[in-house]
Amino acid sequence: MEKIKLKLIVIALAASMLTFLSQGSLAYYSTAATAENIVTSGNVKLKIHEMTDQGTAFPKEGVYIMPGDIVSKEVAIENICQQPFYLRVKVIYGVNEEELTAEDCFKLNINKACWKENGGWYYYQGILEPGEMTPEVFSHVEIVGSKVDKSYIGKTLTLSVKAQAVQSKNNPVTDGKYELAAGWSGE
């Protein structure tokens, strides 16, 4: 009888060990897995609008100027994507392919209520939502008569507007310092 009890105990112990070991093995093999994560980023798109005070598009061929003239050029930016964004604008001045500083020939009436200058860029003071357009960056350009003398006769003065945008979602700014938002490109 004792031999039978001993055999039953050994068989029960072996069965328990086998069950215990197989559970550990099953748990180990069932936790090994790989995951594939796909992340898609959005994009931001904008459109620069250059109009005259008459509501027409600013002529692509430019306008004829004289020293002291005030030229109507209303510049605003439109968000043409599905994402809200922060925005900055840079004005680049030139004469016959040579870059100038603003003081050389031009004077702009920047809309300082909505745009703040920092490092040569004008930062829109808000978030531009999809489908919205900013208030004008500036509405006219004065040709500085004391700077545009006879040495400019026959030359072409240029004023180009460059705009950049970065997403505002999950990209907070502190104290309205939009220039500190992450993602601005070097130029």
Image (cartoon, rainbow, N blue to C red):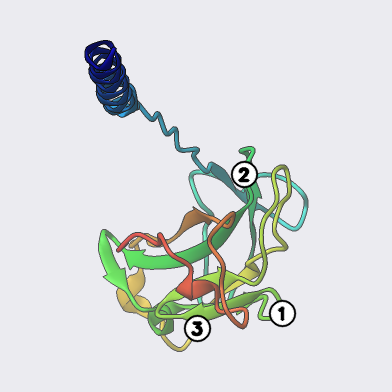
Relative image position of residue 106 (x, y in whole percent): 48, 76
Task: Determine the residue located farthest toward the front in the rendered image.
Answer: 1
The residue tagged with tag 2: helix, strand or loop?
Answer: loop
The residue tagged with tag 1: helix, strand or loop?
Answer: loop
The residue tagged with tag 3: helix, strand or loop?
Answer: loop
Left-right relation of 55 to 2: right
Q: Which residue is mark 2?
A: 83
Left-right relation of 86 to 55: left
Q: Is residue 17 above or below residue 111?
A: above
Q: What's the residue type where badge 2 is placed?
A: Gln
Upstream in sequence: badge 3 or badge 1: 1
Q: Residue at x 23, y 13 (%)?
A: 7
Residue 162 in sight here: yes
Upstream in sequence: badge 3 or badge 2: 2
Point out which mark residue 157 bears: none
Q: Residue at x 64, y 46 (%)?
A: 79
Q: What's the residue type where badge 1 is placed?
A: Ala
Between marks 3 and 2 in the image, the one whose residue lies nearer the viewer: 2
Residue 70 in sight here: no
Q: Decide: few, some or many residues near mark 2? Use Cα within 10 Å; few <14, some 14-19, many ≥20.
A: some
User: To which quarter of the image does residue 120 belong?
Assistant: bottom left
Q: Is residue 53 above or below residue 36?
A: below
Q: Which residue is mark 3?
A: 145
User: To which quarter of the image does residue 178 belong?
Assistant: bottom right
Q: Decide: few, some or many residues near mark 3? Use Cα within 10 Å; few <14, some 14-19, many ≥20.
A: few
Q: Which residue is mark 1?
A: 113
Residue in front for this viewpoint, 146 or 47: 47
Residue in front for this viewpoint, 165 or 9: 9
What quarter of the picture does the C terminus occupy? bottom left
Task: Determine the residue located farthest toward the bottom in the rendered image.
Answer: 146
Q: Residue at x 78, y 52 (%)?
A: 54
